[in-house]
Image: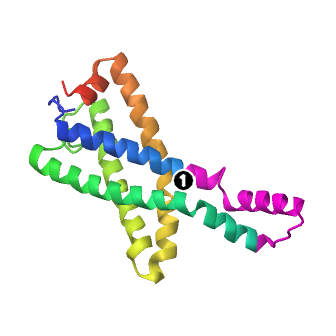
Amino acid sequence: MNDNKFSLAHRILHWSLAIAIIFLLLTILLRMGWMNKNHMADILKENLSEINIQISDDQAVVIAKKIRQPMWQWHIYTGYAIVVIYFLRGLLALFQGWLFTSPFERGLPLREKFQSWVYLIFYVLLGFSLTTGLLIEFGPENLEHTAEELHEKSMIYLVTYIILHFAGLLFAEISTDKGIVSKMIGGK
């Protein structure tokens, strides 16, 4: 890992990306769980039947989708914000360099090589996720279904990366890189 001080721009982009990704995952988890369209439709039908209003399953699903639509719009807005952050991080890397060593560099210790590969794979997959998200919104209609399927798989690597990132931080704090979290907050 490069021992450079984390610049203010790097720290702002890092924490902005972290918060945005966590918020994005929250919208996904809400959509899959508590605000699942079928679950919400069942609640609607049950409560409406208590006041003698009957609606079909399809009508209940349509209403459920409309209820959760504003929350899903935040998923899309956050995706746009991540596109901007991703672009700015790329620009920052051009001017200040990456803050991790290339995994292709010879002679790297195994831990550092693994860490570098994790970061590289994360940024490549994040770019892929952003591309599929943009294709869903702005791409040709014939690619929408495929883009959605691929985009939904993004949660697998995001959750995996978050787990690896926190495990790596914990390992660093109890081994050789004490204070790494403080450096990402304060820059020194």
Q: Position of residue 46 (x, y in %)?
A: 84, 59
Seen in the image, is 169 located left or right of residue 105?
right
Please report the residue visible at 68 percent of the width from the left and 71 percent of the height from the top.
Answer: 62
Please report the residue visible at 52 percent of the width from the left and 47 percent of the height from the top.
Answer: 26
Main secondary-structure element of the magenta-colored stretch? helix
How is this picture coloured?
rainbow
- At label 1, the amino acid type is Ile
Please report the residue visible at 34 percent of the width from the left and 54 percent of the height from the top.
Answer: 82
Quarter placement of the C terminus: top left
Of residue 51 and residue 58, the one placed in the foreground of this image is 51
Chain part drawn in magenta: 29-58
Q: Position of residue 45 (x, y in %)?
A: 81, 63
108 to 79, vertically: above or below: above
**Residue of label 1:** 28
| Magenta-colored stretch includes residue 42 | yes
User: Residue 132 falls in which quadrant of the image?
Assistant: bottom left
User: Residue 18 falls in which quadrant of the image?
Assistant: top left
Of residue 152 and residue 87, the one placed in the foreground of this image is 87
Task: Tell me the SS state at disc 1.
Answer: helix
Q: Is residue 106 visible?
A: no
Q: Position of residue 51 (x, y in %)?
A: 87, 61
